[in-house]
Amino acid sequence: MRIATYNVEWFSSLFDQKGVLFNDGEWSARYKVTRAEQTAALGRVFKTLDADAIMVIEAPDQSGSQSTVRALTGFAEHFGLRAREVVIGFPNDTQQEIALLYDPDVLTCRHDPQGVSSGPEGATGAPRFDGSLRIDLDIDATEDLVVFSKPPLEVAVETRNGFRFQMIGAHLKSKAPHGARSDAEMISINIANRRKQLAQAIWLRGRVEAHVQAGTPLMVLGDLNDGPGLDEFETLFGRSSVEIVMGHGKKQELFDPHARQALARKLAALPTTARFWIRQEKRFLQALLDYIMVTDDFLSRQAKWRIWHPMDDPECWKTPDLRDALVAASDHFPVTIDFDDPS
């Protein structure tokens, strides 16, 4: 059984309002990559992954006449993918949805939101992800209301052989300091935004603990946009979003080998899942942002992880067309987990 998470940069811009692929020579939202080139690259990557399910981060838009399901099912049909049916949860207004593409011959999947419906007044603990969390962000004895700009996607999954587990697809993101008029104001906005992101991580961790305490096999996967040692705010707040969601140091800790390696870092090179061009410095920045965290139920099924990095993974590197496709398709690279599903 293979499950993947893949953040596809500006996937939505490859489709028209009816969810049909443009697949033409116009520029995509990726720098100097046409829509046809990005589409072909994504097709090559998805076909090679041949995953039973792919958690698509930044999936095509769901709003107005646009349909995430229509776009992704059309994409799967265009490239003849096994993973051809789609589950989407609560849509958002960022044009970057979270959706699961899966093979219906192998898996049964359904949107399965958990938690109480909080309403506009919010709730403490771990309410449903389309609501609001009441939490004191700045230790002023006053509760703030936190919402997800991209509500995590909760999916109940059953394999053909009867293994049942929960999957949570997440895309945590700290907003850029828009509107800042000075360095001091930029820092202040950055700190406030990071507090909100960490609150979202705490909210997500609350859901994780509920599943763990119930003995439910669980997989949390997606782009957490944060990690050990990623920036100066970790020192300020003491923990990254990754450590919070994993429950690092707790008895009920989730496992991801790449996160574990980063947390144990000294001076060793770290695994990376994303590659961004820094215009001011004229160089690429690489970062570990994408994770598949699991409970022990998957470790007992001989789980194996892989980052499909075009330069770091030997098989990707020595396959030029796949290597080039991974670079053209997105600024993130897929992460997969393989595990046994015996009958």
Image (cartoon, helix red, strand yellow):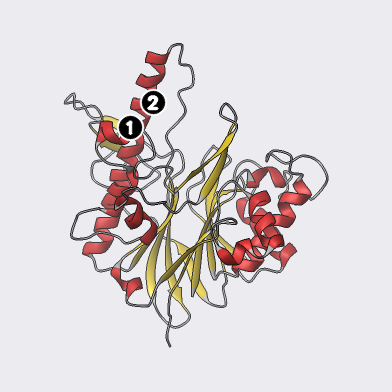
Q: What element carries label 2?
A: helix
Q: Nearer the viewer, residue 327 or 16?
A: 327
Residue 164 visible in the picture: yes
| Between 333 and 191, the one nearer to me in the picture | 333
Where in the figure is residue 259, as x and y percent of width and height? 36, 54
Give the residue furthest to the right: 25
**Camera-side residue: 290 or 287?**
287
Q: Where is residue 116 in the image (x, y as percent from the top left)?
A: 30, 49
Q: Residue at x 53, y 66 (%)?
A: 53
Q: What's the residue type where badge 1 is placed?
A: Phe
Q: Which of marks 1 and 2 is nearer the N terminus?
A: 2
CA separation, marks 1 and 2? 9 Å
Local SS, label 1: helix
**42 vs 265, nearest the viewer:** 265
Point 29% across, 56% down: residue: 208
Image location (x, y in percent) of residue 303: 40, 72
Disc sitting over residue 14 in the figure:
none
Circle 1 sits on which residue?
Answer: 233
- Note whether residue 221 is visible: no
Q: Report the disc number at residue 190.
A: 2
Q: What's the residue at 61%, 56% (across, down)?
A: 69
When the figure is inspected, residue 41 is found, relative to residue 240, above or below; the finding is below
Asked if residue 67 lies left or right of residue 206, the reply is: right
Asked if the residue under mark 2 is in contact with the one under mark 1, i.e. CB atoms within 8 Å, the reply is yes
**Mark 2 neighbour class, 10 Å CA radius: few under 14, some 14 to 19, many 20 or more:** some
Instruction: List the single residue furthest toward the front.
Output: 267
Position of the C terminus by quadrant: bottom left
Number of numbered labels in the structure image: 2
